[in-house]
Image: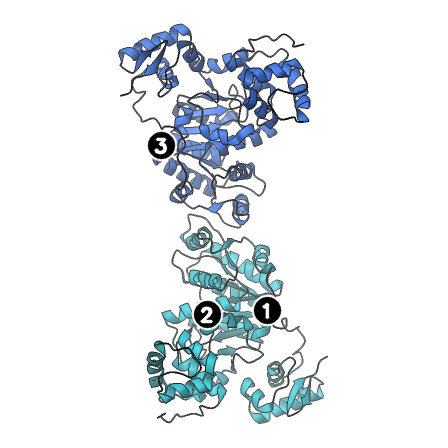
Chain colours: A blue, B cyan
Amino acid sequence: MAERLAFDATDELLATVAWSRISEPGEHVAGALVRALGPVAALDWVRSESQQPPGVPPHIGWQAAAARWRPRLQALDPRRELEAIRRRSGTVVLPDDPRWPRRLDDLGDRRPMCLYVLGSARIASITHRAVAVVGARACTDYGRHVARELGVGLTGRGVTVVSGGAFGIDAAVHKAAVVEGGPALAVMAGGLDRLYPRDNLELLEEVIENGAVVSEAPPGTAPMRQRFLARNRLIAALSEATVVVEAAWRSGALSTARQAAELLRPVGAVPGAVTSMASSGCHRLLREGVAVCVTDVGEVLELTAGLEPAAEEPFTQPGLLDGLGPQEARVLDALPVRAAAEVDNLVRVCGLSVTETLGALGLLEMAGRVERSGAGWRRRQS
Amino acid sequence: MAERLAFDATDELLATVAWSRISEPGEHVAGALVRALGPVAALDWVRSESQQPPGVPPHIGWQAAAARWRPRLQALDPRRELEAIRRRSGTVVLPDDPRWPRRLDDLGDRRPMCLYVLGSARIASITHRAVAVVGARACTDYGRHVARELGVGLTGRGVTVVSGGAFGIDAAVHKAAVVEGGPALAVMAGGLDRLYPRDNLELLEEVIENGAVVSEAPPGTAPMRQRFLARNRLIAALSEATVVVEAAWRSGALSTARQAAELLRPVGAVPGAVTSMASSGCHRLLREGVAVCVTDVGEVLELTAGLEPAAEEPFTQPGLLDGLGPQEARVLDALPVRAAAEVDNLVRVCGLSVTETLGALGLLEMAGRVERSGAGWRRRQS
């Protein structure tokens, strides 16, 4: 007999947020269940305490997994997570949202339940062309220099740099992208209510301004070691290719590279002096055949040259949101490119109140940017 | 009608030296002819002015090649070349000599006619385990440091370093081998009467002392550009594997690497900073898949790990020539390992007079190192 929950478990958004709370990042049993049943029915099954979920293959792990998830459902109220992310003007993007980066679907059952997002940029758009540049926290001046060059070069060519927002290589490449005025994408291991590391806060705020900071972990999640490894799979999956700039022999950046390789995405490694321990992980990737040698931005772009572009529209041209107030920009950005959306839906996606959303739609309509369509609203094609 | 020659063209040694003089290094038409007919009959054919050499496939190039070679035969006296090399206490090693490094035979028709050798070491023995370490003349301190490390490490593990005796990487690796007291092998592009470059003379004399300096070019040959490229094939062919330490984008060291790869020998490249032009050729080899990334001597040895040892006896143990005078050492070294040799043959190989050779054989016999065998002499197996 299902116990009483504090929230409406038939709401898909709330049920998804609940899943992001009760399952571990990348936990493939949870992913398989939610992909098969949808988040609402999957949650129903967990509460039902039946032996076997309907419509999924028999598996010895179902009951054990449900036993792990069930205690976390008690006292869970996903509205708190939503409230926390909206307080930071963030949003939650679900896999069926047009803003969802389709590349994440290559993770299969290890796909995140949802993405928590801070930032004005449309995630699907800025990852249309995206390369991960990752590396050691304890980098050298050489590594920092190369990361900066790649950050400037990729951004200048309309390619978003994806990284982990950490010290060292991550910070250098994010900084370069931000200085170039391009979008950058930082993927956090913990919840977005506590950006980590704290000493990078100013830089991460600039990334939010110019691009986005995302996490699959709901607000309130501490960035623990296991979560960093899970986070690395998102960096790899969000990017067309992954480049390691400097990495020690056992650097976490190597796990990002290996996860990219498992996804059959190209991996590059920047060589360095064999006398530098900070390059030994890069040379290891070269020797193991995981990575190819890349020495400049041109060679990084060659990695992605033969790839199909992602099935999303290219990065939004500068100017689309120009001259709009922040609320209008958020509402316009939340509108699907071709389909119409109802106001309730927009409210949920934007994290604005109904009154704010309707006000913004009115201003956008006067500006000729949106139009009514049946019971909803759509973008006007220019 | 053959013109008169200044020398006995039926003598195989003289005919071979003549071939090394009239053909270009690595000239495969000459190589094919000499391999098919032997040097004496091949020379006969050149002098005969007949249309087609006997026993070789018809080829449009035979007459043109003979027309190139014939003028050089005039006034040629290979005894002068022999005298010049013997004056420097050097020898000439022919392909049927047990001292011949069998690995050179992989060059096929591009095999050298013979090797001119300065140095006490038995070439076949010191190349039993041998790795080429080559690189830029204009190297950096980093490249010099790495070359030194590899030279010390390889020599310490009983592996002979093979290089070109040039400035920069070549000199650094030769120097390291010599300092370690191991044999080193330097391959010259020009004749051994003029060791090149002159500023490396002291180092090259040390290499002669500890190993050998060799060339396929007879004394009197100037080291011209084309000869350096031909020389590089010998460095590659003499070695189990070739490692490039530093090389600019169009460095000659890349040709050595490519020739090694064509011989299906493993090639390694040492990475460096992508900001260093001196490493750009190494990174090019890595990107083109010609070379694998090597960062220390252990990884260099891994290159050769799966290879069959060369079909020669291992490097002569220290002690074999201990306590012998220089003439006895040369005679003992010239004796085949298992077969017997006649005195005339030994005289030719050692570059000693008949009297000197017989004297040395007498002393070696008393020392229990050699014994008579039919019309000749052989080593006593200990």
Q: Amino acid at mark 3?
A: Glu
Please determine whether, in this image, residue A338 is positioned above or below residue B234. Answer: above
Q: Amino acid at mark 2?
A: Asn
* Front in this rendered view, residue A264 or B217: A264
Q: Does residue B163 appear in the picture of this structure?
A: no
Residue at the image position 38 percent from the left and 43 percent from the top:
A298
Chain designation of label 2: B
Which numbered disc, 1 or 2, marks the residue that appears first in the sequence? 2
Q: Does residue B117 appear in the picture of this structure?
A: yes
Please determine whether, in this image, residue A324 is positioned above or below residue B374. Answer: above
Residue at the image position 39 percent from the left and 27 percent from the top:
A125
Residue under label 1, please give it. B310
Q: Nearer the viewer, mark 1 or mark 2?
A: 1
Q: Which mark is residue B35?
A: none
Q: Secondary structure at mark 3?
A: loop
Chain designation of label 1: B
| Labels 3 and 1 share a subunit | no
Residue under label 2, please give it. B200
Q: Nearer the viewer, mark 3 or mark 1?
A: 1
